[in-house]
Image: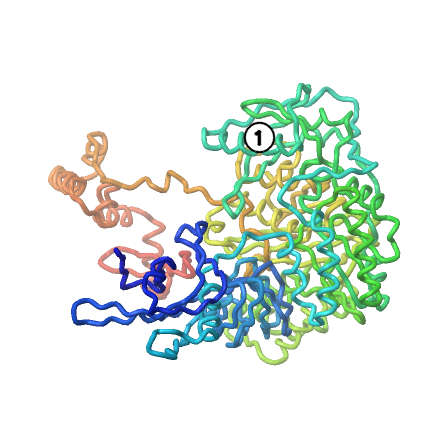
Amino acid sequence: MKILIDTGAQYSFINEKFLKIFNQFKYSAIGHQKFFMADGLTYFIVTGIIYLNITIGDIVIPIYTETIPIDFPVKLSRSIKILSKSKQQIPVTVNSSTATLPFRPSSNFIQKTSIYVPHLILNIRNYSTLLTVSNSSNSPRYLPKGTVIGIATYNNSDSYNITDNKNSITPNTFNSASQQINKITTPPPLPTTQQTISNLLFHIADQTQRDLIQSLLFKFQSTFDTSKYSVAQTKLSHVIETYPHTPPVSKCYPGNPTIIAELKSIINKLLEAGLIRESQSPYAAPALLVKKKDQTWRLVIDYKKLNAITIKDNYPLPNMEATLQTLGAGYHYFSKFDLKSGFWQLPINEKDRFKTAFITSFGLFEWLVLPQGLRNSPPSFQRIMNNVLGAYSEFFLGYLDDIIIFSKDFNQHLNHIEQVLNTLKSHNLILNPTKCEIAKQQIEYLGHVITPTTISPTPEKIKSIISLPEPRTLAQANRFIGALSWYRKFIPNFSSIAASIHAVTNLTKHNRHKFKWVYEQSKSFNELKQLLTSTPLFLNFPDDTQSVLLSTDASKIGLGGILYQEINNVRKVLYYHSELLSPSQTRYNPMELEALAIFKCITRMRSFLLGRNIIIYTDNCPLCHMMNKKISNKRVEKISLLLQEFNIQQIIHVKGKYNCLPDYLSRHPIASDDELPDDYGLGFTKDKSSSIQLLGVVVTRSKAKLLSHNIDSTSSSSQQQNSLNSSSSSSHDSNDLHNADDYFDITKLKEHQQNDPQIQKIINDLKQRPNMSFEYQNDILYKLLSHLRGKINEN
């Protein structure tokens, strides 16, 4: 018999037919168990376990079954929000089907998120379990899917007991050991729709309720299956009504071979899915790709010309305040559904499909479904959803793609969910399970947290104001008061509340050293912040009869924005936002930073802006036409295309001095902890000019000739030689470069000062009345300068 022995192997295997040759060996039958080979696919069946000795010469070597500790990452199974000052159960996945393993939290995770996770024993079933975490901070934490929470460790300390001298083993011992081994070595199956659905139900503590709702959702697996694209079967479709016009035509955008190959791949997938078709339309809008944060590509169509001739659809959106008041009527169970690629599921009217044609370097195509970027997409979406689910208005509300079901008790909620899912299935509408929430007793909807007894705004809308640090210097205090100048007429008793701050900021130049910030100023500061975030200045809901106004600004460290409305000539604020720039964003030019501020604010305030008329105020004039004209800046142009779904009526230039509070927020940004992608494909591209290096400095013949007229021949010759030597040297200091490039002779300075009557007058005055702004040494007058905060100021 030939055998192969691997001394480092965790387990050894022997063919059962060889054991039959040696009758003295007995083994414990354990039932058929699968073990997988290294490829993770090929497997073989193990029927039992045996304890053997191998004799080599006079040496007897026992083969022990020993294992080493195995660490399994414990990862978040879906993106989740941990509310501030709360304890919450979160669903996690582990690469072990069924086991009870000790868990230790990741110190890196705790440091980055300030979320407390205890050491505990995990009871893993079907590759998943629940973890209880605590967020003790004053702000919520957003955790993306796949975040590593900690490590679960498998350590097999079981030993096998020999019951007789014929090497037989107790069956129960081996059954336990072999099952543990098999659980670890069997790879997990591919994610399934059922597993995805189960992950939505971890928060339900009552096992009976969880089983009931799980069995219900399993009946609608096709509605949660996102593996394929689908087109909804609805009575209504999107219509594109236009003014009389000549079909708008644009040339295709150029691209390198890599981009063209990626674009072809995406187009082929859309053709196979039945979302687009080849076209012979007279229309042609250019298509381009934008790289997303996960390095995949997003197809974007420039529909600026088509949108300019499209007649506005005035179908109303639900009133946000009335919607939330409906939810506050004592309901105890809430479920929220999100449509997968919502717009792409809705069909376009057959007679209007040719208007959506887009051009590439390899062909012309048109959409069969509603693409992103078309004007009137939000009202069309709302109209179709109301038509599909309008019969369930007693327990259903839909605000664009935010669908919520609400019920008084659990059994009623099951019935309501079943009715809605039946309707969605009959219309071939597919949900995105990773963004759905099922049978919650507390849920976030339209910027508010809904519970059976309360409706409260989420802190995100005012977080940028609440997080403002108190001023510590006179300059900081002046900037804070200046930032509120536009709002003082809308804040009751502003002068009396801010009096203590005015007392320490209205200081003359000679009294600035008397500035102090003590309890009275701190109290006024916090009272003003409270007034900025409460009625009458702050609104929880927008007025549907008025346009929304957005003021934005950006600095080199952050960006800020304020969403508000002018109601009866009184400003009412809806949302404050500020955000710290990433290292790459700090290298954007001013126009790109201002465009980024608009993009980030609109994306963050999306639920307040979709379907509404928007007027934007910015202090960067070139951006005023970015929504209707091509901008000669690729990053700004991409931002304008990503904002096409919003009804931006006008972008107005405003002087910086009238844009005080957004400017102040941009200079006091808060770190972004939301789930929004960082750049949405607007990543920084390294400027090739930054690679240019100074290789050396030379003095040309013309420069040498010019120098010879200013200095004597001896010094000129010496200076040229020194300059030429420095140019050939491998290293140069700043003085060498300066001397070689622009010669300075102090004797000439002395001569010019002696012939200058104004200089001589200053010298005479200085001798009689010494002045610290000048100094007279070695017959030369010097002007004293001081460096302050990177700038040179005259004393």
* Residue 765 appearing in the image: no
Task: Please say if 128 is above or below 260.
Answer: below
Task: Please say if 435 is above or below 241.
Answer: below
Q: Mark 1 sits on what residue?
A: 268
Along the viewing direction, whichever of 566 and 398 lies nearer the viewer: 398
Task: Please say if 713 is above or below 6.
Answer: above
| Residue 424 at x, y percent in the picture | 78, 47
| Residue 576 at x, y percent in the picture | 67, 59
Residue found 21% across the figure and 32% down from its top: 700
Task: Please say if 45 is above or below 138.
Answer: above
Q: Quadrant of the N terminus?
A: bottom left
Q: Tag 1: Cα neighbours inside 10 Å, few (<14), some, or many (≥20)?
A: some
Looking at the rendered structure, the secondary structure element under dot 1 is helix
Residue 365's image quarter?
Answer: top right
Along the viewing direction, whichever of 561 and 387 lies nearer the viewer: 387
Q: Which kind of residue does numbered mark 1 sit on?
A: Asn
